[in-house]
Image (tube, grey):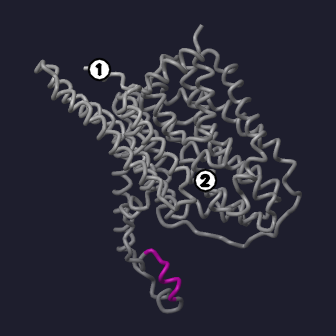
Amino acid sequence: MTPADLTGSAVGLTALALFACAYLLVVLEERLHLRKSIPMLLAAGAVWGLIGWHYGGAAASAANPAAREALGALAGDALQHVLLEYAELLLFLLSAMTFVNTMEERGVFDALRARLVARGLSLRAVYWITGALAFCISPVADNLTTALVMGTVALSVGAGHPRFVTVAMINIVVAANAGGVFSPFGDITSLMVWQRGKVEAPGFLALFLPALVNWLVPAACMAPAVPAARPASAGETLRLQPGAWGVVALFLGTIAGTVVVHHLLHLPAVLGMMTGLGLLKLYAWWLEVRSRRAPVPDAIRSTNPFEAMSHPGASRQSFDVFRQLERAEWDTLLFFYGVVLCVGGLGTLGYLQFVSTHAYAVWGATWANVAVGLASAVVDNIPVMFAVLTADPAMNLGQWLLVTLTAGVGGSLLSVGSAAGVALMGQARGVYTFGSHLRWSWAVALGFAASIATHLWVNRWAFGG
């Protein structure tokens, strides 16, 4: 049985108001010091409670036994469908986060940061290098982690140069968000589009040039504002922990295996990621066994106790992948649960079909997808993209690529529009702010418009006709 259109009913309006209030509390997270997952979890329970209450009452009043049974099962079946979608995304993201946390724990990102800082580069060189690295790393590591690593480099090199820090942070946010759109692993919105089968994994590469334009246009506009200074070289050097390169190789192999599982075997992508997580745990076990069996040389033990402590055979603290699982962004994952269930509930009530009918049918797919990008600058791109996928408007490949692009890079228009921007505001508190980003929003908007034009021109083959 198809759910009824309840957009104008008391149940529908109440559910919409609950979601709006919950999201307002999410926006005020920094001011209220209230974790963003809390209001969304409560709103999800309330929205589905209203749906269950409505259809439970409708089933009780139905005269036909078959209609009574169908109405009674409708809410539960719809909720199970939404939960299945969330479960696949949760396990996928949990595996990816564990890999990234493990690489961080093994010192991969710290070593990269130390090497860049130690080179004594000019501020202008650091500006372009951190932007380029953010663009190149974010397709395989999430854009949040990428932004934080590059942000640390900018802060370390640009100490005492607040003007540099501001433009460098904006450059990193734009580059990390842009780099995430031409890979199904670079951003949650790209991942959702891929898992729904709207775009195959190789198809995302069509967005490489538009994404590059999205970064380069504002980067070039802001470059003259970078001071022509050369800070003193830092002498910091960091060594990688044992097995660091093995973890990196496993991560890249897991990504390749996931694409094969999804594209050739037609199985959910999460299977590849969870299998890779199993291999990571096996590798961690092997590292631990090797560490326990490695003896500490007597010369090191007797002459240099600190070096003995750092020797592989001296450490008995296990390299446990479960500790990296614990470090996952659980607040974000639970927030994502609340968003998926709330948006799924609004879809069951008929709101997403309403949006699909009016926005995409009246405005046309291109302008509607541009509006999705503008909305993601204010509202998190996860609920916006999930709403589009749930509404499932009839679009060709070119339009699905367009909405992937706009939803991914639209968050760069404001500092609060993406997780990368919010994180860097906390990292460079008082220097990189909402206002400082807003002063350069015109440049980011130029890149946003140029990337859309580039996609419409370069990838016109994907639009058919």
Q: 414 left or right of 439?
A: left
The secondary element bearing badge 1 is classed as: loop
| Nearest to viewer (mark 1 / mark 2) | 1
Q: Residue 406's x, y, as percent?
A: 61, 32
The circle on residue 422 is: 2
Q: Is residue 367 above or below residue 273?
A: above
Q: Could you say which quadrant of the image residue 56 lies in? A: top left
Q: Residue at x 57, y 15 (%)?
A: 362
Q: Nearer the viewer, residue 271 or 244?
A: 271
Q: Residue at x 72, y 29 (%)?
A: 449
Are the two marked residues, 1 and 2, in contact with CB atoms closer than 8 angstroms? no
Q: Residue 128's x, y, as percent?
A: 76, 49
Is 237 within the magenta? Answer: no
The segment highlighted magenta reads: 305-312
- Residue type, label 1: Thr
The circle on residue 2 is: 1
Q: Could you say which quadrant of the image residue 115 lies in? A: bottom right
Q: Residue 93's x, y, as percent?
A: 43, 46
Q: Is residue 104 above or below residue 95?
A: below
- Residue type, label 2: Val
The secondary element bearing badge 2 is classed as: helix
- Give the overall secondary structure of the magenta segment: helix
Q: Residue 412's x, y, as percent?
A: 66, 42
Q: Could you say which quadrant of the image residue 81 lies in? A: top left
Q: 354 left or right of 453?
A: left
